[in-house]
Amino acid sequence: MADFEHLFNEVKDKVVQLGKESLGEFASQATKEVTEYLQSVAEKLKLHTMQLATGKIDKDDFELILNSEAALGQMKIQTQIGLAKIRADKFMAGVKSIVLETLLKVVGTVL
Amino acid sequence: MKFTKHLLPAALLLAFLLLLSSCATIAKFNRETFQRTVMLKARTQVLLGHADESYTLYSGKVDSILLEAYSIYAMEMGRAKNEQTINQWTKLIGDKKTMLTGFFSSWKKKDKMNDITIESMSSTITGGFDEILKLEGQKLKQ
């Protein structure tokens, strides 16, 4: 079974490398985007509150703007969840490739 | 000996490969919905620019945009593993008090919208379309 162990280790090493390349940077990028968005929302809230206070917009418009901003925030969260799934699928596609390549090598050895 | 050394590992790898084949967690990219959403975003941006004019002049265009939006939404609902995109469309058009539907309802009620609200909502609604396109554009191709 020494050959099988060698094979397994070869696949494992390639998969670990693939994982680092495809999944590593995602978390920091997602955090940065969310943080920047929250900052912009805080600034908008301040601006629109002042506009409401000075009568430049009415209460209905204020609510429309703020509730829509909250909806946009939720859409952004859905994007990040979806992107995480896509990255996971890309990673699995890479793993399939590695396994197939190794399989073909083994079959080639037998034949 | 030959079986254990070569064929058993091959069989195990093949089994693993078959298992991985059914592992997708999200729908694949759909060119039709992507292109239709791009066009809808552009048409919506143009229409929002007219919201300082009387609603009655543009009610037909509003209906046309909503019809297209609901049509794309229906297509997205029909795709498996498409939860995030469906949720995004629900946020964009599903609530009568926010985003696209909310803006059109308000425009209809007031007849004319003020420039501050138009500018802010145009940015937010465009942002909503961009999120949908960003996600769809990143999905794996068939």
Image (cartoon, rainbow, N blue to C red):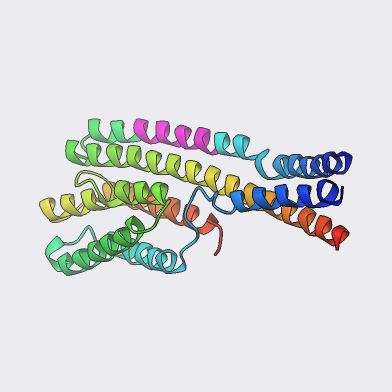
Spot occupied by residue B77 in the image (x, y as percentages of width and height): 33, 56
Report whether residue B49 is seen.
Answer: no
Report whether residue A87 is seen.
Answer: yes
Residue B27 appears left or right of A110: left
Residue A46's place in the image compared with A16, above or below, is: above
- Residue B66 covered by magenta stretch: no
Residue B46 appears left or right of B59: right
Spot occupied by residue B142 in the image (x, y as percentages of width and height): 54, 64
Spot occupied by residue B107 in the image (x, y as percentages of width and height): 17, 54
Residue A2 appears left or right of B100: right
- Residue A39 covered by magenta stretch: yes
Viewer-nearest residue: B48 or A102:
A102
The stretch in magenta equals A33-46
Viewer-nearest residue: B27 or B23:
B23
* Residue drawn at 43 percent across, 43 percent down: A78
* Residue drawn at 39 percent across, 63 percent down: B37
Secondary structure mostly seen in magenta is helix
* Residue drawn at 77 percent across, 55 percent down: A103
* Residue drawn at 19 percent across, 47 percent down: B96
Residue B62's place in the image compared with A37, above or below, is: below
Spot occupied by residue A62 in the image (x, y as percentages of width and height): 24, 37
Locate residue A27: give its quadrant. top right
Count of numbered labels shown in the rendering = 0
Residue A47 appears left or right of A32: left
